[in-house]
Image (cartoon, grey):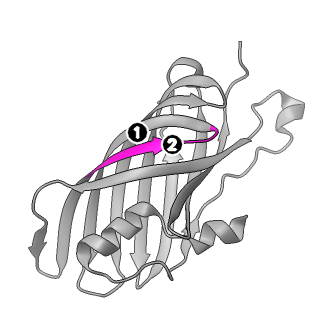
């Protein structure tokens, strides 16, 4: 499973590649940080890490002209996503990108609000993305913003990994939630 995570580029990094003409990023490897399960969580009554997976569709839409100057290009894009599977939700977000004159080097940050159900529990939460590409080597972190969960998703914490295989997008989401009332 970890091999699949590291073999795929995140959609936002792919968007950076496309936006800045950095070539095909599909051969680059993404490095994602997996959440560390809490030791003896069940014994202490703490939430236990759960796993959700599924697919998603995404539209990345440039917002205005890219700002090109002095070795870098800055861009802004909107994100429109539909998650399927264990997470059945829609998401809207904004992404800021920076590309450089060095092929394969770029970065992005993004925030997206996700609204729907996670394993049958409804509400919303916010994901924060941070991605860099250093001469083709990818590193990506997508984390739930603390205390952003609403409704039955209040108290949600976790990390999401994006996988792209054979042109299809999927996610793997390791998370914790307080026990249902």
Of the image marks 1 and 2, the number of the one nearer the N terminus: 2
Q: Residues within 10 Å of mark 2 (few under 14, many from 20)?
A: many
Q: Which residue is denoted by mark 2 in the rendering?
A: 83
Q: Is residue 145 magenta?
A: no
- Identify the element where label 1 is drawn: strand
Q: Nearer the viewer, residue 161 or 83?
A: 83
Q: Nearer the viewer, residue 167 or 137?
A: 167
Q: Residue at x 70, y 66 (%)?
A: 2
Identified at 29% across, 87% down, the residue is: 102
Q: Which mark is residue 175?
A: none
- Residue at the right extreme? 43
Crowding near the residue tagged with mark 1, few <14, some 14–19, many ≥20 C-alpha atoms within 10 Å? many
Would you say the residues marked 1 and 2 are in contact, meaning their CB atoms lie under 8 Å apart?
Answer: yes
Q: Is residue 154 visible?
A: no
Q: Which residues are magenta?
A: 78-86
For the stretch drawn in magenta, the main secondary structure is strand
Seen from the viewer's position, the closer of residues 153 and 89 is 89
Residue at the (55%, 42%) spot, across then down? 84
């Amino acid at each position: 499973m970890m091999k699949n995570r590291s073999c795929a580029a995140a959609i936002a990094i792919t968007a950076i590649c496309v936006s800045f003409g950095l070539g095909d990023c599909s051969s680059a490897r993404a490095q994602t940080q997996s959440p560390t399960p809490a030791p003896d969580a069940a014994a202490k009554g703490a939430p236990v890490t759960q796993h959700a997976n599924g697919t998603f569709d995404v539209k990345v839409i440039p917002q205005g002209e890219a700002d090109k100057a002095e070795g870098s290009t800055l861009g802004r894009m909107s994100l429109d996503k539909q998650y399927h599977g264990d997470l059945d939700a829609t998401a809207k977000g904004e992404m800021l990108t920076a590309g450089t004159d060095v092929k394969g080097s770029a970065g992005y940050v993004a925030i997206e609000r996700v609204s729907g159900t996670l394993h049958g529990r409804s509400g919303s939460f916010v994901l924060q993305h941070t991605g860099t590409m250093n001469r083709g080597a990818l590193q990506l972190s997508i984390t739930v913003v603390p205390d952003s969960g609403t409704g039955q998703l209040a108290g949600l914490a976790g990390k999401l990994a994006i996988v792209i295989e054979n042109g299809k997008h999927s996610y793997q989401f390791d998370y914790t939630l307080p026990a249902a009332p």
